[in-house]
Image (cartoon, grey):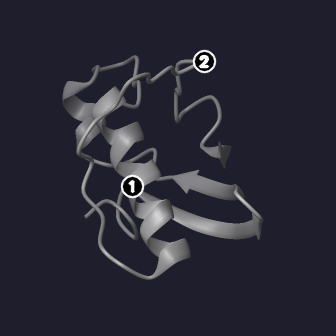
Amino acid sequence: MLLGDFFTIHHLEETGFDIKAGLVINAGHKIFEGHFPGQPVVPGVCMMQMVKEIMEQVIGEKTNLIRAYEMKFLAIINPQENNAIQAALK
């Protein structure tokens, strides 16, 4: 849904239960026209969708989020300041 348009995966590494993905966010995407004009921030819902799509790339199947006990984003992502990010999943 977002992969290929909102973001791309330029590196994907899987070691046991650890996944590391190098991502590039499209700083010119239309989402940033409303979130927020002049001060773009990647919405939390987009971050969760990116995690879902990374998992789907690794396991080769579609997934659904059924339950989330804890979600924590450690930083705001401003694609104009840094559109290349590293995602780590366990």
Location of mark 2 (residue): 74
- In this rendering, is residue 53 above or below 33? below
For this view, does 67 lie left or right of residue 20? Answer: left
Q: Residue furthest left?
A: 34
- How far across and down, in percent of the image, does residue 76 sit? 53, 19
Residue at the limit of the structure toward the bottom, as seen here: 60
**Mark 1 Cα shell of 10 Å, populated few (<14), some (14-19), many (≥20):** some
Instruction: State the CA–CA distance, disc 1 to disc 2.
Output: 18 Å
Q: Residue at x 65, y 35 (%)?
A: 82
Left/right placement of residue 15 relative to residue 12 reads right
* Badge 1 amino acid: Lys
Q: Which mark is residue 52?
A: 1
Q: Is residue 68 above or below residue 52?
A: above
Residue 40 at x, y = what percent? 39, 25
Given residues 85 and 89, the one toward you in this image is 89
Rendered residue at 52%/35% (across/down): 79
Residue 10 sits in quarter = bottom right
Task: Classify 23 as above or below 81.
Answer: below
Q: Residue at x 52, y 21 (%)?
A: 73
Q: Name the element at disc 1.
A: helix
Mark 2 lies on a secondary structure that is loop
